[in-house]
Image (spheres, helix red, strand yellow):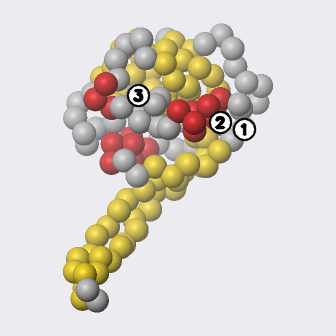
Amino acid sequence: MMKCFALTGISPDVIQELHKGRPRTLELQSAHNVVTLAGLDPGAAVFMTSVDMEDLDPGDTGIIVEIIAISITMKRMMEFTQGYHFEERERMSARIKVRCIGSSLVKSVTHEGIMHPISVDVVKSACYHAG
């Protein structure tokens, strides 16, 4: 069994593409996923699933990915209404390059709230991509 942080609500198409074994770069904007990534460095292993954060339970499946590169940025956006400045907004996002290292199954979930990363105990599959 392995303990790692979880990225939730990832598109099934993205997970399927990663499962083919090629590294891919993703941009994540969900607050809980950005919070999870903020404390990680390249080389960390992360569980990734299409299951929403609120629904993640033992028995759910996903993949384990290795973070190759990570960048967290703040974007400023201006909203305008009829030509007048209306409101300034900021959006934090995380760009990560990851590589799938195997399929996995959740055994237990620890979630202390939206501003804390979701931690899972997972069992790794016996089938891995050669790296």
Residue at numbered disc 3: 51
Residue lying farthest bottom?
Answer: 83
Type of the residue with mark 3: Val
Residue at numbered disc 1: 22
Q: Are marks 2 and 1 in contact (CB under 8 Å)?
A: yes
Residue 30 visible, this orientation:
yes
- 2 or 1: tag closer to the N-terminus: 2
Type of the residue with mark 2: Glu
- The location of residue 60, given as percent across then percent down, is 43, 17
- The answer to whether 128 appears left or right of 14 in the picture is right
- The answer to whether 40 appears left or right of 79 in the picture is right
Q: Residues within 10 Å of mark 3 (few under 14, many from 20)?
A: some
Secondary element type, mark 1: loop
Type of the residue with mark 1: Arg
Q: Quadrant of residue 118?
A: top left
Give the CA distance from mark 3 to mark 2.
16 Å
> Nearer the viewer's eye, disc 1 or disc 3?
3
Disc on res. 72: none
- The location of residue 116, given as percent across then percent down, is 28, 38
Secondary element type, mark 2: helix
Secondary element type, mark 3: loop
- The location of residue 128, given as percent across then percent down, is 70, 19
